[in-house]
Amino acid sequence: MLRIRNLKNKYQKRLIRPLYAQTQATPYAAVLDPSFRDVSNNLVLPGAAFLYKGGLVPGTVMSNKGDNVTVATGADAALRGFGLLANFVGGELDDLGDENFVGVWRGPDAVFEILAPGFDDTGLSVAWTASTPGLPVPLYAGVDGRLTCQPGGGAPGTNRLIIAHLLERPNQNRIIVDLRV
């Protein structure tokens, strides 16, 4: 359930929805990395991460960092993709409050619907229309932590893990992905 702090957000939708996840996906109970809190226990969000209404969005690619999770960015090749964030973190739509516990959707072959702005649309339209029908478009963790396609359509770079495959793009505000992690 969303913990909205402002009445203007009462119609906000969850940006990630499991479509085929009953046996394929698991909402993994994870703990945010301690770097997300300052000495006063205030939430500090990573500077490179995409923020919507002042917080992280569901569908953000998360990486396992020891016993904790952090935002996976394309620039941080040392971390591997772990799953997709299930919660709004920080800002006007914060699900956490003073907690550090988040849900991370994991599970290969699970199919999710992701609503904008939970994915990076840059290049997705071109990649989707240029793709061979029936072949999925690989998606990676972008520099801001959201799912995106490989810029330029080239082969993945070093340590770039395929996080999901784009199965369908019903419109510009919605994508259907097959999770690979």
Image (cartoon, rainbow, N blue to C red):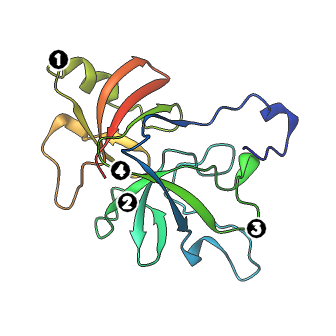
> What's the amino acid at mark 4?
Gly
- CB under 8 Å between callouts 1 and 3? no
How far is disc 3 from disc 2 in space, using C-alphas? 23 Å
- CB under 8 Å between callouts 1 and 2? no
First-in-chain label (1 vs 4): 4
Pinpoint residue 78: horizontal percent, then vertical percent: 29, 70
Secondary structure at numbered mark 1: loop
- Reply above or below: 114 against 49: above
Pinpoint residue 155: horizontal percent, then vertical percent: 12, 44
At a point 37% along the width and 60% down the height, the residue shown is 82
First-in-chain label (3 vs 2): 2
Question: Which residue is tagged 1?
Answer: 133
At a point 60% along the width and 70% down the height, the residue shown is 36
Question: Which residue is tagged 2?
Answer: 82
Pinpoint residue 71: horizontal percent, then vertical percent: 47, 60
- Reply above or below: 12 against 142: above
Q: Nearer the viewer, residue 4 or 160?
A: 4
First-in-chain label (1 vs 2): 2
First-in-chain label (1 vs 3): 3
> What's the amino acid at mark 2?
Phe
Question: Which residue is tagged 3?
Answer: 98
